[in-house]
Amino acid sequence: MHAHLGDQLVIESTTSGATRRDGEIVGLHHADGTPPYDVRWSDTDEVTLVFPGPDAHIHPVEHGRPGAAQGFSAREAGGSEEAPRAGAANPGDIGRRVAAERRRQGLGREETARRARMSPGYLSYLEEHPADPSVAALIRLADALGTTTAALLGGGGDLPPGQGHALLHPRLRDLGEAECRTLLSTHGVGRVAVTSSDGRPAVVPVNYEIVDDTIAFRTAPDSLPAAAVGTEVAFEVDHLDDALSKGWSVLAVGLASVVTEPEAVRRLTERAHTTPWAGGGREMWVSIRPTSLTGRRITAEKQ
């Protein structure tokens, strides 16, 4: 008997042939796919070590795939369920998301692998090669990085956030100025509300930085965000967790101005975490010094 991660183990009645129990193989103890297996049973969701008997059969999820894609065995992956599978929907995307989130948090591979209870060698492989890790490995990685498996898989990437159901007992609370500053200082993408040249309101996403409590973003002189210069504008950032139906938002209001002092421009450019995603010649720095900071957070009400 040989199996791959994700295959279904079915226990059948020896008399009627009817299925008595089934579950997903989530762990291999031998690189060649021979028993025993770690099985997550569909009826209890528990994982147990199984030595299949004559009444057990393997139902492959995919036929013809290698048990350890690209020559990476289960033993090298860390002992069991991390062995990659061929046939990922978007080869390499998972590894890129894992690496990006790990670097964003300032975590090394060794520490991330320790938190996820997998070998550093497998994590390196996952980040550098197309792979399709098991559900168990993804869950541990998501937990280690403080994110969700859906985020690592890119699920709903083309959909607007907030598709999940509302919490049964949500709690909406106002944020203090200090907490707003902390959330705002994470940098990333925010939205600036401006009035265009024809008098119409507009909201534009921009890559922003926080330097000395000042919001700064790069744009082009003839772009829509440049219309913010010389006016009082609103700038908003937020984060939504669809899986847990919670999130926060921060709104900053202040006067926008062009940064012209050469040393200040050099300092902003050197400290920038990323170049503008929109590309093109966007070398004009615009700063917003908030005169008002407000925010709200949605969490589950403690029962």
Image (cartoon, helix red, strand yellow):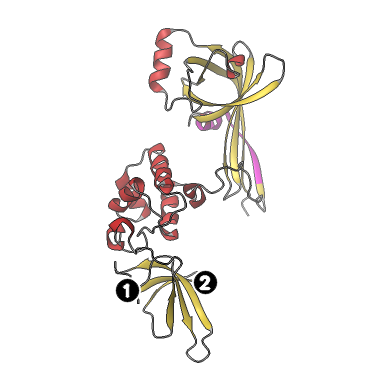
Q: Earlier in the sequence, mark 1 or mark 2?
A: 1
Q: Is 70 in the magenta?
A: no
> Which residue is drawn at the image coordinates 34% and 68% (left, top)?
28
* Residue 63 higher or lower than 53, as above or below: above
Circle 1 Cα neighbour tier, 10 Å, few/some/many (<14 / 14–19 / ≥20):
some
Q: Amino acid at mark 1?
A: Thr
Q: Secondary structure at mark 2?
A: loop
**Left of 210 or right of it: where is 197?**
right
- Give the magenta part as a residue range: 171-183
User: Residue 178 lies in magenta, yes or no?
Assistant: yes
Q: Which residue is label 1 attached to?
A: 34
Residue extending furthest toward the top: 261
**Which of the pair 288/28 is nearer the observer?**
28
Q: Are there few (<14), some (14-19), or many (20+) residues within 10 Å of tag 2? A: few
Q: Residue flagged by tag 2: what amino acid is it?
A: Ser
Judging by the rendered image, the residue that carries numbered circle 2 is 42
Q: Nearer the viewer, residue 260 or 177?
A: 260
Up-down relation of residue 156 to residue 197 (above or below): below
Q: CA distance from mark 1 to mark 2?
A: 21 Å
Q: Residue at x 40, y 43 (%)?
A: 96
**Image coordinates for residue 74, horizontal then vertical, percent:** 31, 62
Choose mark 1 or mark 2, whichever is in front.
1
Q: How many marks?
A: 2
The picture places residue 61, in percent across and down from the top left corner, at 46, 67
The percent coordinates of residue 169 (x first, y second) are 67, 51
Q: Determine the residue positioned at 39% across, 14% down.
A: 266
Label number found at residue 112: none
